[in-house]
Image (cartoon, rainbow, N blue to C red):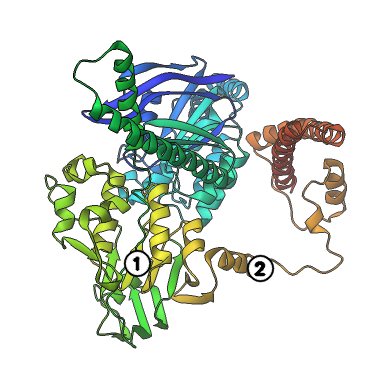
Amino acid sequence: MNYVSAENLSKSYGVKTLFKDITFHINEGDKIAIVAKNGSGKSTLLKILMGKEIADSGAVSVNKDIQVVLFDQEIDFEGELNVEEFMMTLDSAPILALKNYHHALHTENADDMEKALAEMEIHKAWDLENEMKQILSQLKITDLEAKMKTLSGGQIKRVALAKLLLETRAEHRHTLLIMDEPTNHLDVDMVEWLENYLSKAMVTLLLVTHDRYFLDAVCDTIWEMEDFNLYVHNGSYATYLENRMIREDNLNATIDKANNLYRKELEWMRRQPKARTTKSKSRIDAFYETEKVAKTDTRKQKLELDFEMKRLGKKILELKNIDKSFGDKVLLKDFSYQFQRGEKVGIVGKNGAGKSTLLNIIQGLEPYDKGEIETGETIKFGYFSQKGLTYNEDERVIDFIKEIGENFPLANGRTISASQFLRLFLFDDQTQYSPISKLSGGEKRRLHLMYVLYQNPNFLIFDEPTNDLDLPTLTVLENFLLNFQGSLIIVSHDRYFMDRIVDHVLAFEGDGEIKDFTGNFSEYRESLRDRSRPVQNSSDNSGTETNSDHARIVRDLKEIPPTETKRKLTFKEQRELETIEKEMPKLEKRRNEILDQLNNETDYEKISVLSKDLETVSGKLEEMEMRWLELQE
């Protein structure tokens, strides 16, 4: 089923063209990620699909039988509503049925109750309330009575995300889910949960994200917006990078050929008399087309920085027995660490664990309760904070950078200009001479990053640098940091970024305890799983019971002696149990059918589809089995 079709879309703002004559289609079940540098028109394209903006030319056709739902960076809410009330403001039939059911429970009116029960049955809304609480719990929102106005920015975004996920499940219409940077403000546990949720969910998804592990786990298609065009890549992020490299190599070869032809044709143009024949006129037109190709610059962003960093002395930075608390909350307890030259340290932990506090203490921006800090005399900190920069909105980008200096020092006494350094970080000439007020939010974050690096520090401290940065900028930043000879501290929830850069992890594990782990981020996460994994004896077969049959579960359950008096099921729970007992045999039958098809299928594409179906059905069956056990107990 086709959801959206776009033909020859173009959009510009003034003299700046975002995209030109792009055509694409979104079909049911597609999971698409958009990759582009900030300012290329990603957000504008999403708004056009939502009907919030109009393209300059071209047409967008949205199937009348689908709903389009957007998870945006800006969240609208009424501050006096509590979390549960905000969640229940969804305008969907199942939510309305649930509201009517709660109303009937309070009024104890028999007619209202009969009508409410019928609506709950029609809209299959029995599980909706539990699902809402489960989603909120996974996103670390546990106080449903908290007013929205009392929540932090990150909490508001997580509640809005939960509401969106509930909406896609509550509606039985076909839904196109559009998500703009959904992993910002989520810790790693939440990101991994959302990743698992979306990868298994039967949704059609259009996603903008900088998290490459998340992208690979959830999406199977990548749209690349580059040079006003849209390129489609089927496969992983690695496939996209390979396809992009091949395209650029082919383009460079075309440019080389055009340069050779351009030199010959330029000589011919110079020899021609003013009077032109029709034949020479067509050759002149061809010359200008060749000139356009020949002057295309695809290599201007591939500068190599052999930079001259301020010398690091023997003493870098040493923390001795540092304590820090806020009231009863202990953030640091007897923490000691000595930073080494060239060390790249990642700091991880849950939100509010004290990561940003440690960064501030290191730089002398915040006092500590006890201990000692020794900082080397030659240390020059460069701090990329979450707060952003303060600047004059009317100032031009190039002038803002030149306030630090006209040139950036390289090794052997060489320098590059401020303009060349800006170009390295994907600011083209037109953007460099634009006022800062004209930049997108992501471009302002990139300028902040530029401002920090251009001061040529020898000890970099990055607090969530990947939020709102596009993937092309992240690639440039990663290459920069891999060659960086100074010391580096990074706080980030971006697993790919951390794996590529850091070689050491300081993990905030709660109550002021910080674990010193040698290795990258994924290795640390695996060590956590090993620690939490229960030791099993040889006779324990629990690891093989994920897909156990309903009949065996019933048999095993009957053999377990009751340990306490069971409470009576509520009416709702009884109906839920009856529904599960009807649905589980159907799912078991469907799973067996898929297994039979897989055993007899040789076509790779069909095997891939069947494997996804099997994973979905098995997941649903497992969830039902666990819920069935809970209700029986």
* Residue 96 in picture, x, y percent from top left: 48, 25
| Closer to the camera in the image, 181 or 548 | 181
What secondary structure is found at the residue carrying circle 2?
helix
Task: Give residue 306's mark.
Answer: 1
Q: In screen coordinates, is 434 left or right of 51?
A: left
Q: At x 82% / y 33%, what residue is drawn?
A: 602
Name which residue type carries label 1: Asp
| Closer to the camera in the image, 487 or 547 | 487
Q: In screen coordinates, is 379 left or right of 123?
A: left
Name which residue type carries label 2: Asp
User: Of tags 2 and 1, which is closer to the observer?
Assistant: 1
* Residue 147 in picture, x, y percent from top left: 34, 45
* Above-or-below relation of 534 to 189: below
Q: Which quadrant, please, contains the N terminus? A: top right
Task: Give residue 520's mark.
Answer: none
- In which quadrant of the rendered view does residue 279 lie? top left
* Residue 212 in picture, x, y percent from top left: 51, 49
Query: Does the rendering let one see residue 107?
Result: no
Q: At x 41% / y 76%, what residue is drawn?
A: 342
What secondary structure is found at the residue carrying circle 1?
loop
* Residue 407 in picture, x, y percent from top left: 19, 62
Task: Give residue 530's mark.
Answer: 2
- In which quadrant of the rendered view does residue 460 lie? bottom left
- In which quadrant of the rendered view does residue 406 lie? bottom left
Q: Residues within 10 Å of mark 1 (few under 14, many from 20)?
A: some
| Closer to the camera in the image, 74 or 495 | 495
Mark 2 or mark 1: which comes first in sequence? Answer: 1
